[in-house]
Image: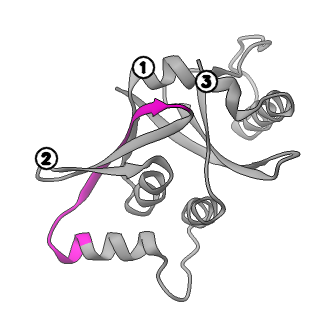
Amino acid sequence: MIEVEVVGVRIELPSNQPLVLLKEAHGERHLPIWIGTAEASAIALAQQHVVPPRPLTHDLLVSVVHSLGRQIVSATIVAVEDSVFYAQLGFDDGTTVESRASDALAVALRVNCRIWCADAVLEEAGVQLAEGSDGTEEGGSAEEEETEMRRFREFLADVEPEDFDE
């Protein structure tokens, strides 16, 4: 398993399809996952630490889990088949529950747990966006992030979900 981080939610043009972008915590590969609009909103709100006036479905799930005395300790992207990503939520007692990748990510951001991705998923669907980098570590992290996002936007200009099928 490889630890990943949520970079953010973006809208892929021209189809206006939302996607969530994950990045290896200690590597250069990225994992774009096309998701629904509701899930994109839920992930973006959690990333921005926005608390809605009434709980969203993911907030409700977290509240129920906590009320039952359990903790969510991990979210894992376990498989990709026909461009559909499968995930699991892991609990403090070792129990795992199947989930859509987008829902697992929305919950993980709310409980601040680690996010993992199966090696095979990154091998199959991961993309390398760092090409063309000069390899130096100089520059601020905001500048590096902007460069990374610019490269990702360029990548998205020509990619379709079917490109990840094999």
Residue 94's label in the rendered image is 2
Where 95 sits versus 145, above or below? below
Of residue 26 and residue 156, the one placed in the foreground of this image is 156
Q: Nearer the viewer, residue 92 or 164?
A: 164
Q: Earlier in the sequence, mark 3 or mark 1?
A: 1
Name which of mark 2 and mark 1 comes first in the sequence: 2
Give the distance between the C-alpha atoms of the residues marked 3 and 1, in whole angstroms: 14 Å
The image shows residue 52 at horizontal and vertical percentages of: 56, 81
67 drawn magenta: yes
Q: Indicate the secondary structure of the residue bearing disc 2.
A: loop
Distance, label 2 to label 1, CA atoms, is: 22 Å
Residue for point 47% across, 31% down: 80
User: Type of residue at label 3?
Assistant: Asp
> Which of the two discs, 2 and 1, sits closer to the camera?
1
Q: Is residue 158 left or right of residue 118?
A: right
Residue type at mark 2: give it. Gly
Q: Give the quadrant of residue 141.
A: top right
Q: Residue, x 86% and y 33% (percent of image)?
A: 157
Q: What segment is highlighted magenta in the picture?
A: 65-82
Residue 102 placed where, x, y %?
51, 52
Q: Is residue 29 above or below residue 75?
A: above
The residue that label 1 is drawn on is 120
Q: Which residue is mark 3?
A: 165
